Amino acid sequence: LKADLWHWLPGGFKPGVRATEPCARGRPQEVRPPVLAMDALLNFSQPLDSVLLDQCVNAVYTGSPAERDQAQRVLTQLQERINSEDASAALNWFRVDLILEQGTNPHTKFYALQILDACIKYRWRTLPREQCEGIKTFIVNLVIKLSSDDPTLRSQRLFISKLNLILVQVVKQEWPHNWPTFISDIVNASKANETLCENNMAILKLLSEEVFDFSRDEMTSAKAKRLKESFNADFSLIYQLCDFIMEHSQKPSLLSVTLQTLLRFLNWIPLGYIFETKMIEKLVYKYLAVPLFRTDALACLTEIAGLDIGATYNHHFESLFTTVTDQLAQSLSPDTNFADAFESGSEEDTRFIQNLALFYTTFLRPHLTIAEKTASTQPKLLESALLTLIGISRVDDMEVFKICLEFWNHLASDLYTSECALTPAVNPTLLLAPAPPLGGAGAGGMPGSGSTRRQLYATVLSKVRLIMISRMAKPEEVLIVEDENGEIIREPMRDSDAITLYKTMRETLVYLTHLNVDDTETLMLEKLAMQVDGTEWSWNNLNTLCWAIGSISGAMNEEDEKRFLVTVIKDLLGLCEMKRGKDNKAVIASNIMYVVGQYPRFLRAHWKFLKTVVNKLFEFMHELHPGVQDMACDTFVKIAQKCRRKFSMLQVGEQMPFVEELCLNLPSIISDLEPSQVHTFYEAVGYMVQSQTDAAAREALLFKLMEMPNQTWQDVMARAGQDINVLRDQATMKDLVNIIKSNERVVVALGHPFMSQLARLYIDLLNVYKAYSEMINTAVASGGQYATSTAAVRGMRAVKRESLRLLEAYIERSEEPDTILQRFVPPMLDPVLGDYVRNIPEARDPEVLSLFSSLINKLQAQMTPEVPRVFEAVFKSTLDMITKNFEDFPEHRTNLFHLLRAINQHCFPALLNSSENFGLIIESIKWAFKHTERNIAETGLNTLLELFNNVAMSQVATAFHQQYYLGLLQDIFSVLTDTLHSPGFKLQAQILAHMFMLVESKAITAPLWDPATVQATDNSTYLRELLTSMFVSSFPNLTPGGTKLMVDGLFDSCRDLATFKQHLRDFLVSLKEFGGGDELYTEEREAELARKAAEVQKRQEAVPGIINPHARPDEMNDL
């Protein structure tokens, strides 16, 4: 990078084009109040007032609220104006060069850099060649000027970093075709000045990141490939520079940035530079031992360690592991306390400990066999590495712990696969029995001489088990937590990070248990004994221990599990009796409930213990400590799901099935529960009722279960029959809501057999619905829309909404569509649809739309005769509510588009009854996929794709294509090129490919153009020309020739969806509409994640105990 490589043109960026007047910088001007004068910046007919620009920028940071708002508006509009004007003239007017060189306001400089950055990214190809060279020269010279002096480089680090980014954007546009000597220029310039060299290394680092890490959505695939090839071709020059610096430089900051730059190169450079040079040797022996450089050196070694390149380089990796471990042993003593060092050390110390964990975990995951090979000749190496990881696993930092945890999970899984999984179980019919130890169990459950791998890791794995037990994360089922004040409270919200961490720790501990059941059991019982005797008593210690105990459900054989669990529950119950204080008892109670809830297999096999546990849960339901009742009800539901048959059968020694006894005592059991907890309780009993296979007995049980809410319902109906105003009472509304919710939860558990109970309520339910509809209409008539916010109307609407949800829940689970159609649909049409259309928008319930979506999905074509009535009642009225903007009535708009999709899928002929309505449907679909709310947009796109398929099989295809094809094509391209809709790329691409295929396959026979105004030969030629013209006029940076090639490519590749999508991605990148997101590859990423998830699921299903007992399929249920 030499200062005299290019001639800077003094008159502005574009030679031969003069700005209206010279830049006003430096002229004395009157200092005007920004709030009054800022809009003058938007007058492009006058020279840029640089003083006013400074004032405007300063107002954003230091002005009053009014000044800040106006300054932000003016600066935003100014940037948009410059970006939308002719780029060359706009830059001549704005004079970025003088602002950057002569300006003193740093904020204004950064604003100017933003404008220049946008121009380079999005308008570079529209600039004249001379102006491009001028910009390039100016940026290069400015970077050289500022980075050649060490004090300046330090003092203006932020500004120079932004300039470096600008230069990299220029390089991406110019290199290699217009700037083939870039690499040699920057390398040669670096040899002249260490300070300049330091900044040049930072530029190379940025360029590597842009090309190899962030190029996927920033550049077309062809351009990215070209840049990568250029980088590889010239890398020898870069490597020589790095090697020269590492060998000869004594400047710490230069060496650090060189190591950081090298780190960015290591994942793509040819392997010979890594393994056939002295790079590794220098990193290990020259830099790893120096505290100042050890963190960066270790990061480079970690990148090398993570390379998985086949067996050819195994001896190099063995040497890497040996030399690094030996070198680290010289600086780290065997008894290093990493937890204390991390807690009390400097920021550099914490980074080093984290990088140390990354190095060993990154190396050992792909190269574990290499490390094991060294153990035969140098046994201390692998042991030292693993003990280092164990020490780091004790660090009280979650990110560091997760790094270690991932490796322990990998190691335990690998050992289980090689040592346990291939050995058949003792009893193949026992699904959850763990595999016996390979080669026979030795002392402590360890295998004999046939299992040298397990013996190699025996000591280490025991320490890992203890760490897993001591640090086990909180499971999803536990609702009681300790707050920052040391008080026990109900968890305010789900901690998703803790749940994810728990799942990984749980899986790891299950593998470790399979590898040595005795050691796991011994460690857990020893920890529990120390809780009982008080030597390690604390809430946290008890919690982590019990969460660990619950996590290994299914990992032991039944006899061992029985013995172990009886001991655990006995000790926990004794601890609960022994400890005083509500908080202590709440913590112990939550742990008892969690543990018993995790062992449904044990509970099913031991009725008396199951009964004792459930009765204990009933006791906890009367405990008023926050969270205990909730957890008791949730545990009861899970036990009821997994042990349902045990409760509906007559057990030995019992006078009646437990569920009958429960129904008799139900009022006293639920007397202290909140309404939401009562609903959960009813769901649990519903599972017990559902398990009764005899239909008559099931009906009798259902009648007993619902006796109390039914009696309350009948009392309300009787009083309302005498005086309808009874329904206006707030307490009555709450009673009705709770009764309906309880019924809804029973439907969820019981399913279709709930019909008899619904039949008892149905007519009364509709009458209550009508009564409340009339009351709401009366209130609205007198109080207007504000009446809908009163407590009375809100209570009435709550009853109506819950009624609709109850009907929907049953319809979804019904197994007799004909009965639904004949008995349930006719009575509901007038009360529900009539009320909806008559109400004001604020009083319409979105559940109506959801109910009819469920009806159509359940009854499908049988609902076709009723669709016109549904359409007339809800469609137009709802469209009027939601088409004013994209925000109001969010539930209505979501449910309406789901209803439209259901009609299109199952009742398409009903849509063709009216051409006016059909046009409204098309506009509705357009409105849906133009939404920025992703779920609504996806529903609209799916509906459109299904509509195309339905139309193709109908008699209206020709008329449809002639009337709607071009409009739909333009609207799909409109959302495709809008970054707010980029998550819908997958469906957008499918629709476009389908539409192009219709033309290319000549499925559309009628002309798509108007013969009276357009001359064309066929649809394909016409569309190609139309799209080319549309894109060129909409995107000034596109050329007609290049755009035609792109459009032709879309048509030519429409038969191959994968090729079509890649071509479309390149097209979008060329439009410069996708600048910083990664949504274009969402489909591929989601598919890869789904594939990996399926593989993990398959692997987990083969390991007893890995899957949570409540997440296992119904082979765990006692049916």
Image: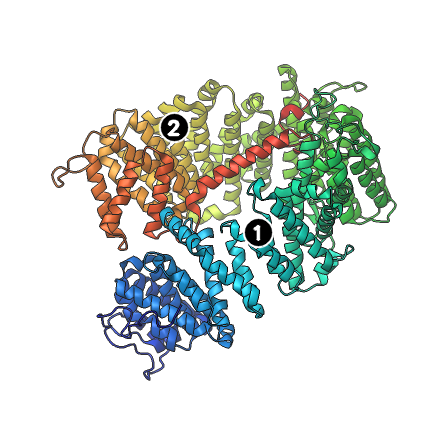
Q: Which residue is identified by label 2?
A: 905
Horizontal side of 587 relative to 132 (left or right) equals right
Looking at the image, is mark 2 or mark 1 nearer the viewer?
1
Mark found first going from the N terminus, 2 or 1: 1
Q: Which mark is residue 476?
A: none
In the rendered image, residue 1020, in percent from the top left (x then y), is placed at 22, 36
Q: Residue 100 placed where, x, y %?
A: 38, 73
Task: Please provide percent x and percent y for residue 83.
Answer: 31, 61
Note whether 593 is above or below 227 in the view shown: above
**Mark 2 secondary-structure assignment:** helix
Residue 892 seen in render: no
- Residue type indicated by callout 2: Gln
Instruction: Bin the neighbour count of mark 2 within 10 Å (Cα to Cα): few under 14, some 14-19, many 20 and up.
Output: some
Q: Circle 1 sits in a helix, a strand or a loop, which is it?
A: helix
Q: Amino acid at mark 1?
A: Glu
Q: Tell me what residue is drawn at x 29 percent, y 75 percent.
A: 10
Give the x, y percent position of residue 932: 40, 47
Looking at the picture, tell me which residue is in the foreground, 804 or 281: 281
Q: Residue at x 50, y 19 (%)?
A: 816
Image-quadrant location for residue 837: top left
The residue sitting at 34% across, 64% down in the picture is 79
| Up/down of 454 relative to 557, above or below | below
Q: Are marks 2 and 1 in contact (CB under 8 Å)?
A: no
Q: Which residue is mark 1?
A: 303
- Per the model, the C-alpha gap separating discs 2 and 1 is 52 Å
Q: Nearer the viewer, residue 409 or 187?
A: 187
